[in-house]
Image (cartoon, rainbow, N blue to C red):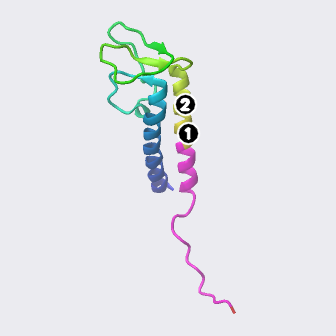
Amino acid sequence: MGPKFLIVFVFTTMINTVVWQKYVSADFYDCVDEAIPGYWEPGFWVHAHDGQSVMTVPKVNHHQPMSAPDTIKQGWSVPRLLGLWFSFFTASIVVSLGLARIPWTPRERSNQSLE
C-alpha cells in the first residue's frame, strides 16, 4: 500500500496546489511577497510587515506593490483559511488511502473454459 499511497498523495497534492492558487488565493487573500504556492505554506498566507497590519477588504486585488499591506477578504481569517486547508489535506489523505487499497493490476483469469 505504501508506494500507491505516495503516488496518489503526490498527485492530489499537486491538484490541491493548483486549486488553492487558482481559487482560494485568488479570491480570499493576497500576500504581496508570496514566493511559494500558498497551499505549501499553511498558516502563513497573510502577515504584517513594515509596521503595517493585514487589511480586511471587500474584494482582494492582486499584484500590489511590496509597500502595500497583505489583504484578506472580509469574512475570512487565517484560522478559517487553515480550516479550509485542513479539509483539502484531509481529502488528499482519504482519497490516497482509498485508491491505495484498490488493486492496480488486473487479476489473472482462471484457465477454466465455459462449457
The answer to which of 113 and 25 lies nearer the viewer is 25
Residue 61, percent across and down? 41, 22
* Residue 13 picture quarter: top left
Q: Residue at x 30, y 13 (%)?
A: 67
The residue at the far right in this view is 115
Residue at the (58%, 80%) spot, across then down: 109
Residue furthest left as drawn: 66
Which residue is more in the foreground, 74 or 40? 74
Residue for point 55% across, 77% down? 108
Mark 2 = which residue? 84
In this view of the protein, which residue sits in the foreground, 62 or 103?
A: 62
Contact check, label 1 and label 2, Cβ < 8 Å: no
Magenta segment: does it hold 11? no
Region rendered in magenta: 92-114
- Decide whether the magenta segment is chiefly helix, strand or loop: loop
Label 1 vs 2, first from the N-terminus: 2
The amino acid beneath tag 1 is: Thr
Residue topped by disc 1: 90
Q: Residues within 10 Å of mark 1 (few under 14, many from 20)?
A: few
Gap between marks 1 and 2 measured at Cα: 10 Å
Q: Nearer the viewer, residue 66 or 37?
A: 66
Residue 96 magenta-drawn? Answer: yes
